Structure formats: C-alpha cells, structure tokens
C-alpha cells in the first residue's frame, strides 16, 4: 500500500506520526502481515479518531474502516503478541521513535 499525499485536514500534532510511518514503510505497508499488528502498536499512542486519520494519511485506507479494524485487532482478530513485538522491533530499527510516554 502506498502512502497518499499529506492533506491539510491532518492536525499538526499528527504530522510527525505520519512522517515516521512513511519513513518506516517507504514502499507502503504489507496489508496482510503488518496491518493488524501496526494498529495494535499505534493504539496506545493515538485516540481512535487520530488512529484513523494517521493511517489514512500514511497508507490511503479509509479512516472509518481503520477505526473498525483497530477495534477488531484489539479483540477478536488480535495478532499474536510475538508478531506485534516483531513489528515493533522492525519499526524501531527503521527509525520509529514515537513511544507511549505513560
């Protein structure tokens, strides 16, 4: 999945998250392997609304769909913890520096 051009609709505080996602996934995210684990990684960092906005801006997936799929990724379709951790490690190695400071 390729990213889309940034929109003026994205709140300023989310620009860095979108920028880093594009840095980590320069050729786009693998929807089959990375998508649900990514939603789990991003969930503690962003509100539901902001999660949808960020993923839509970075990868072109409709924000409303993202929010619904994030709810599933955190419950009935939850990826295995080791899969999430592998993605988190890959993201950090690729330059991801945004962490939950709580």
Image (cartoon, grey):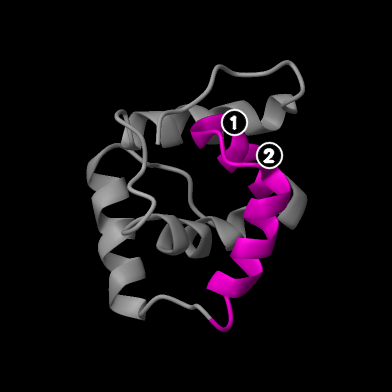
Where's residue 30, x and y in %? 33, 47
Quarter occupied by residue 29 = top left
- Please say whether residue 57 is one of the residues in the magenta stretch: yes
Q: Residue at 30% of width from left, 71% of height from top?
A: 83
Q: Are marks 1 and 2 in contact (CB under 8 Å)?
A: yes
* Disc 2 crowd, CA 10 A, few/some/many (<14, 14-19, 20+): many
Decide: is 54 above or below 19: below
- Please say whether residue 97 is one of the residues in the magenta stretch: no
Residue 56 can be seen, yes or no: yes
Residue under label 2 = 53
| Residue 25 shown left or right of residue 99 in the figure | left
User: From the image, which quarter does the C terminus lie in?
Assistant: bottom right
| Residue 37 shown left or right of residue 88 in the figure | right
The residue range painted magenta reads 51-76
Residue under label 1 = 57
Q: Residue at 36% of width from left, 35% of height from top?
A: 28
């Amino acid at each position: 999945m390729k990213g889309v051009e940034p929109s003026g609709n994205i709140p300023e505080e989310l620009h860095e998250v979108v920028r880093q996602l594009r840095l980590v996934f320069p050729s786009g995210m693998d929807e089959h392997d990375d998508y649900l684990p990514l939603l789990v990684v991003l969930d503690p960092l962003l509100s539901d609304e902001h999660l949808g906005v960020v993923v839509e801006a970075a990868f072109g997936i409709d924000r409303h769909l993202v929010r619904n799929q994030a709810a599933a990724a955190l419950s009935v379709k939850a990826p295995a913890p080791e899969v999430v951790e592998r993605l988190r490690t890959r993201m950090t190695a690729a330059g991801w520096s945004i962490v939950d400071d709580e």
